[in-house]
Image (cartoon, rainbow, N blue to C red):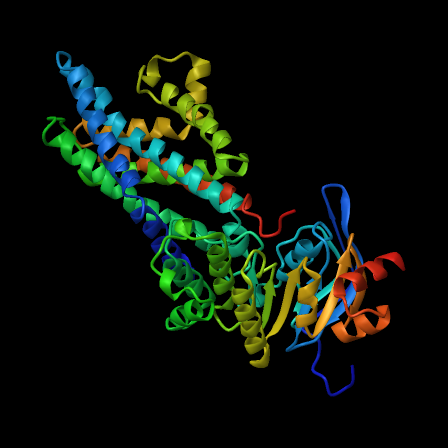
Amino acid sequence: MSGTPATTLRVLRQLRHDPRTIALLLIVPAALMTIFRFVYDHEHATFETAGPALMVIFPLITMFLVSSIALLRERTTGTLERLMTTPLSRLALLAGYGLAFTLLAIVQAGVVTGLSLGALGLDVAGSTALLVALATAVALLGLGLGLLASAFARSEFQVVQFFPATILPQLLLCGLLVPRARMGSVLHAISDALPMSYAVDGIHHLVMRPGSNGSAAGDLAIVLAYAVAAIMLGALTLQRRTD
Amino acid sequence: MNYLEPAPAVTAHELAVRRGGREVLRGLSFALPAGRITGLIGPSGGGKTTLMRAVVGVQRRVRGELMVLGLPAGSAALRRRLGYATQAYAAYDDLTVRENLEYFGALMGARKAQVGEVIERVDLVGAAGQLVRSLSGGQRSRVSLATALLGEPELLVLDEPTVGLDPLLRERLWSLFRELSAGGATLLVSSHVMEEAGRCDEVLLLRDGLLLAQSTPAELTERTGTDDLDRAFLRLVESQ
């Protein structure tokens, strides 16, 4: 994929010129996790079950917001049209974004995981590497959904409206608030169709049951499949020829 | 044209584009001579940008025949051989001038050293480390122009590259265009300023999606009986 490393470097350089965004991406999840820990100071069991789910929710939110706005800008400022006149293929462009966001997600997940397992005293029975892998897969899902949202928005005002439309329902139905097993059959069916349900299932497998790395790996594969599907679908919206 | 001349860089036959329910280009036939500077001149809204987008292969709903460097417009093999500068600058605001050019250079397979060379050619040496966001409008459009020069393209499509520039800079850019053409490149340069037509080897006069004329500037003044290109344009419109 020629042009992918150059695109990754370009996206990372854009971020480097925006240290405030980097700081927000890294500090906010850590701070929220800390608040969450003390909100449930007297109910440590709740923190033990709901806290880990946050570790895959942060990358979804941040990557969706970052990528939907970044790609909307590519579409509206003329840089995408300009790229389409170069030999860069659409998949190479998206792979470049994917790689840059994966790196970012790994750093973000590293910070949150380190803090949660260390200072906040969260117990994870399963593999930490799988935990970070799940967070990274969710980051790619955020990229794919952000890419799709950018195709249906004309402005930054519109694109952020896709956040409550596409991300919040997943958070309501993913098993964070109510275990999925306790949902009615309709909600459960919808929940089954949404990728974040598997991300949170995966986390629950990792955190609660020792030796459940296997089922978490299955969940990871499902989330990755959704992420790839969203990115591929989004690639179709990057037209080389436009009106 | 005689048989000693090289094949045209671009040929169009009955080229038409429909956009937003309106016929923006209405059956154009022309040829761009290779190695020359052709000015695409005409009022705003006449279809200049649409024509350029068709040539570089990003315009949807193009009908008729359009051949670029011997291949149908939009062919993947052309992307390495074309340089395109859009009218509104196309560069990343949150990167420096040099970072922008390094990126486009990597995509075009340009030599690493060429980045510094094009920065010099468009007179942005002093601003190379600055974020594009912090540049003036004229500087930004030159960043966009610089990206088009990377990778030694055979055909340069430049959409209003001199708009809003001071006379000194405009002069510099025209001598740059001359240099590129002397080096063998074909240039298609658009402008809504008739005065710029006089600097081209050939002009395509485009108005309301139709070609009013394709000729040399000298032929144009001869045909219309006036040295003033603005007046020549008006006479052509009147006699249409």
**Residue at 55% from the left image edge and 45% from the top image edge:** A236
Q: Nearer the viewer, residue B104 or A133?
A: B104
Which sits in the foreground, B184 or A74?
B184
Q: Does the image show residue A127?
A: no
From the viewer's perspective, tell me whether residue A221 is left or right of residue A144: left
Res A106 quadrant in image = top left
Locate residue A57, reporting x and y percent. 31, 29
- Give the image quarter of residue A140: top left
Looking at the picture, how far across and down is residue B35, in whole percent?
A: 64, 78
Q: Residue A82: x, y in percent? A: 53, 55
- What is the residue that sits farthest to the bottom in this orientation? B4
Does the rendering let one see residue B147?
yes
Q: How many labels does the image show?
A: 0
Looking at the rendered image, the quarter that the N terminus of chain B falls into is: bottom right
Please report the residue visible at 39 percent of the width from the left and 52 percent of the height from the top. Answer: A96
Q: Which of A37 and A211 is in front in this view?
A: A37
Q: Is residue A157 left or right of residue A65?
A: right
Quadrant that contains the C terminus of chain B: bottom right
In the rendered image, the vertical position of residue A166 relative to residue B197, given as above or below: above
Give percent across and percent down for residue A224. Answer: 37, 40
Task: Say above or below: A200 vs A222.
Answer: above
Q: Which residue is drawn at 14% across and 32% down?
A: A115
In the image, taking residue B113 as reference, residue B1 lies left or right, namely right
> Of A203 and B155, which appears nearest the observer?
B155
